[in-house]
Image (cartoon, rainbow, N blue to C red):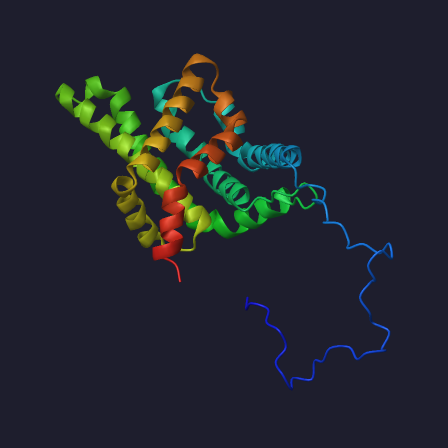
Amino acid sequence: MTPATAPAAGSGATAPAAGSGATAPAAGSGATAPAARPGSFGDGALSRAAALIHTLVTVEALLLLAASPGLAGLLFLGADPSNLPLAAVCLLPLGPALSAALYALHHRDHDLTDLHPARTYRRGYRLNTVPVLKLWAPLLGWLTVIAFTLTHFSATGLPGWWAVLLAAIGLASLLWGGHAFVLTSLFAFRTRDTARLAGYFLFRHARATLGAVSLLVLTAGLTALLTEALPALLAAPLLLSLLHSSRPVIAETEEDFTA
């Protein structure tokens, strides 16, 4: 956008001639300058809050709908550790559903009069399903191997410190996956480039990583203390918190790694 300038001499734009009928209002004639235009509907804090609530509710409903085939399958699985591979298969549809929700929340409108969260969610789902599954499926498989080993650790014959090491590797994998998930949902990188960037940001932005840790702890606490369904019902607010803590990662990616 170029700054507006006064018309140059000889450009053809001339001031109105005397007697042309275009005159300034005389003093005391009762003609006053137009008052400043008040803020339009949807600009206030209450309207922005209503827009956010509407977006969260819509995105949450669409997320649950997209992930419902897998979530329904989980209801028929028992808590036996031998069902972990089947649980991983049921969780496959959750990856694209969460990615589309991140996309919709990142591109959400703040104006109550111009909200299209459902349309934005569908666009994110269409764009991100294949790229996300390329990372989500291997991550699920890797975490399933770790969880299966830990739940059957007594049968492995390994020393106890191996369990601690496996748990640490699993936690690091989850945190890496959080960064990779945000990058895949918001940017169009190749899979291997996304994986490298996620590893780079794991230590580059420790505050963002700690934010992901806090969300993991919160999710685990809600699951353990209340019900397994609660994190799914609060997925949209949790993802919004993930976006908030990932702002340094998103900003640096936009500045340094995109054209």
Image coordinates of residue 84 in percent, x first then y, are 37, 26
Q: Is residue 257 above or below residue 7?
A: above
Residue closer to the observer: 71 or 11: 11
Q: Quadrant of the N terminus?
A: bottom right
Q: Quadrant of the C terminus?
A: bottom left
Residue drawn at x 63%, y 47% is 119
Q: Tell me, yes or no, if residue 44 can be seen here.
A: yes
- For this view, does 197 lie left or right of residue 13? left
- For this view, does 230 lie left or right of residue 83? right
Residue drawn at x 41%, y 15% is 224
Image coordinates of residue 258 in percent, x first then y, are 39, 59
**Count of numbered labels shown in the rendering:** 0
Image coordinates of residue 23 in percent, x first then y, are 82, 69
Residue drawn at x 57%, y 50% is 123
User: What is the residue that sits farthest to the left in this orientation?
Assistant: 159
User: What is the residue that sits farthest to the bottom in this orientation?
Assistant: 10
Image coordinates of residue 248 in percent, x first then y, are 37, 43
Q: Tell me, yes or no, if residue 157 can be seen here.
A: no
Q: Is residue 235 above or below residue 111?
A: above
- For this view, does 36 lie left or right of residue 120? right
Residue closer to the observer: 88 or 212: 212
User: What is the residue that sits farthest to the top in this orientation?
Assistant: 225
